[in-house]
Image: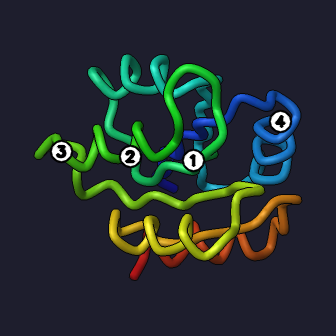
């Protein structure tokens, strides 16, 4: 079975750990970066199959990170799933403009997250 690589960009280690544990025995290989700047460094040498992205992070917001990767040809096609507490209309609109694959609200619904990952990877 080929592992599919998932990058979690999330400042909460608890949220990242919940996702890692939930998908431990699947075909998903999970990598976590605690902030957007570290994630950009990671992306210099890795191209994940999908990114799970928090919006409210210190240093660089999720939107700044997403704009950055969308502007880079070799990264612009990576599906991005937003997982955030920021679910107002303006944020959802920004997500549509930046071509997010799914926009999920915290707390995590693992079934919805798995469905969003499957949709991003296989559709």
Dot 4 or dot 3: first in sequence order is: 4
The local secondary structure at tag 4 comes to helix
Tag 4 residue: 17
Colour scheme of the picture: rainbow
**In this view of the protein, which residue sits in the foreground, 112 or 87?**
87
The local secondary structure at tag 1 comes to strand
- Seen as rendered, the residue at the extreme front is 90
Closest to the camera, between mark 4 and mark 2, is 2
Q: Is residue 30 above or below residue 36?
A: below
Tag 1 residue: 53
Relative to 85, 99 lies left or right: left
Dot 1 or dot 4: first in sequence order is: 4
What x and y, as percent, mark residue 37?
45, 19
What x and y, as percent, mark residue 1?
52, 56
Rounded to the nearest angstrom, the CA distance separating label 4 from label 2 is 22 Å
Q: How many marks?
A: 4
Q: Is residue 17 above or below residue 109?
A: above
Rounded to the nearest angstrom, the CA distance separating label 1 from label 2 is 9 Å
Tag 3 residue: 71
Which residue is depicted at the point 83% across and 52% down?
22
What x and y, as percent, mark residue 55?
60, 46
Proximity of marks 2 and 3: CB atoms separated by less than 8 Å? no
């Amino acid at each position: 079975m080929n592992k599919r690589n998932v990058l979690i960009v999330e400042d909460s280690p608890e949220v990242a750990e919940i996702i890692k544990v939930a998908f431990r025995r699947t075909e998903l290989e999970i990598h976590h970066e605690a902030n957007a700047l570290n994630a950009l460094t990671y992306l210099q040498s890795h191209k994940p199959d999908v990114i799970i992205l928090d919006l409210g992070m210190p240093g660089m917001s999720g939107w700044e990170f997403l704009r950055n990767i969308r502007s880079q040809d070799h990264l612009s096609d990576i599906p991005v799933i937003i997982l955030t507490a920021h679910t107002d209309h303006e944020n959802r609109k920004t997500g549509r403009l930046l071509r997010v694959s799914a926009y999920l609200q915290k707390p995590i619904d693992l079934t919805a997250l798995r469905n969003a990952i499957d949709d991003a990877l296989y559709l």
